[in-house]
Amino acid sequence: MSIRGKANIVGAYEHPTRKSPDKSAAQLHAESAFGALADAGLSKDDVDGYFCAGDAPGFGAMTIVDYLNLRVRHVDATDVGGSSYLAHVSHAAQAIIAGKCNIALITLAGRARTEKFNAYFNDKTQPQSPWEDPYRPATAAVYAMCAQRHTYEFGTTSDQLAWIKVAASHHAQHNPDAMLRNVVTVEEVLASPMVADPLHRFDCCVVTDGGGALIVARPEIAKSLKRPLVRVLGAGEAVKGPFGGDVDLTYSAGIRSGAVAFEEAGVSPSDIQYASIYDSFTITVLVALEDLGFCAKGQGGKFVSDGNLISGVGKLPFNTDGGGLCNNHPANRGGITKVIEAVRQLRGEAHPAVQVPNCGLALAHGTGGLLGTRHCSTTLILERE
Amino acid sequence: MSDVTVIDILPESKAYWDASQTGRLLVPHCNACDRNHWFPRPFCPFCASFDVTAREASGAGTVYSYSVVRSGKEPYIVAYVTLDEGPTMLTNIVESDLEQIRIGDRVRVAFQPGASGMRVPVFARQSG
């Protein structure tokens, strides 16, 4: 059974806040949910499926379903870190095909900026914890080790990594909601403080409060609504860790999630007109681009250089909202904003300065968890009908 | 040096931590498929056999990758070290000159007390 063409994204909403000391995470979930429903032209009583991940407070799906006072007949609280929400789109499509729901609501929200909390590092029951925590593997360091090894094996440079941030900043200047709107240069990235060699502060994503929501619906319902039609063509998900000590930091689980998604969609990387690539750090993007097949393994540095990711300039416009590097990374989870900007591009509703002309085919890709220890890659391929 | 004040040792890896307190590094070895793995668990992550024995490692290894964490008060090195016995483990490199460390460097295990008071296997560059 394939999900190809069996479900549409009919609503998408990114909460405009980037700092919310006066609103609870639950309220941000609610405002995001209502925003996406309004975008779709639906009401909350139309929702019969609900999807969320670990950012939802308390009992998760039960807590938010009750808070919103929904009457759902399908719930899914798959948590694969920041990539959860791409998996939710795929799972919603599967549930729709199976007849378990017709209109699925997916929400994310959190106050990472206000609360300075990261759940990953507070669960001592993980069997890995005793073998990780004593070494203080800071998030940036776990990604930095991937960059260091990539440099060692393929000659990737800090300049090349910096180009990813430069491209994101070129896009963010047009996004009034973006946390960082200043265009930066390669030199400025390299001059920013070193956080964890070889990653500088500008190689790292922003920490924001915020949220987002998506509505996935049966194609017949999508056609009855007034919004441009965006359908799901393919999806893949895969988990990768240190493989029992067989560590290889040069590739991600995207090598599998991407292959599965492309096969299901029946398209190839060269067909993709716009890509949302999870950008917790610059290296996350570089490794993903290789693993998804946009360039050969080891050639990511060359691929991202000289503005190749800048809309209107390069061959592969990416993260035209400014991405996690400049725009938004609510709840330390950037997956939902990746889907939202892909939907904007396919609808032709991205900012005119970054809109890809006649954007008909887009990819959204998430890397949740920690690239250098264990992570989940999720890939979605979406098409404008 | 560690911020971790308590290491929650799971029953399945107690033997490894006990050895660590006496300055010995144990590596799990699967008697069924004859492979070593990391981190310790009661079964083999390669063949799923529960016939796993803790074997004393030589303590020698090679830096697979590393990063100097500079965001806090005192910089420190997080690394993956590939043991001569095969598996690659997450660890710290204890090194007075943070700029000297390179991928491929030969290192040897040391046992350093963390904030928990427990001795934790870390690595130091081998001289010469």
Image: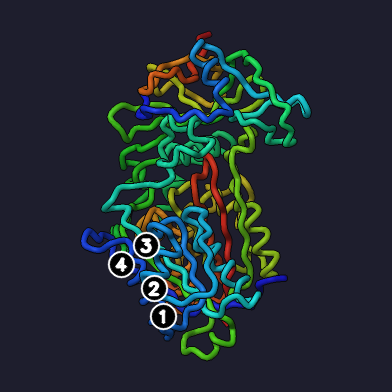
Q: Are the residues under badges 4 and 1 in a single subunit?
A: yes
Residue density around tag 2, few if under 14, some if 14–19, many if 20 or more, within 10 Å: many
Residue density around tag 1, few if under 14, some if 14–19, many if 20 or more, within 10 Å: some
- Is residue A84 something that shows in the picture? yes
Q: Which mark is nearer the camera, 3 or 1?
A: 1
Along the viewing direction, whichever of A196 and A166 lies nearer the viewer: A196
Distance of mark 4 from mark 1, alpha carbons? Answer: 15 Å
Distance of mark 3 from mark 1, alpha carbons? Answer: 18 Å
Tell whether label 2 touches label 3 (CB within 8 Å).
no
The residue at the far left in this view is: A22
Residue density around tag 4, few if under 14, some if 14–19, many if 20 or more, within 10 Å: some
Along the viewing direction, whichever of A80 and A271 lies nearer the viewer: A80
Distance of mark 2 from mark 1, alpha carbons? Answer: 8 Å
Q: Amino acid at mark 4?
A: Gln
Along the viewing direction, whichever of A147 and A103 lies nearer the viewer: A103
Q: Residue at x 51, y 61 (%)?
A: A77
Q: Are the residues under badges 2 and 4 in a single subunit?
A: yes
Mark 2, secondary structure of its residue: helix
- Where does residue B32 sit, x and y in percent of width and height? 78, 28
In the picture of the structure, the residue carrying the numbered disc 1 is A44
Numbered mark located on residue A33 in the image: 2
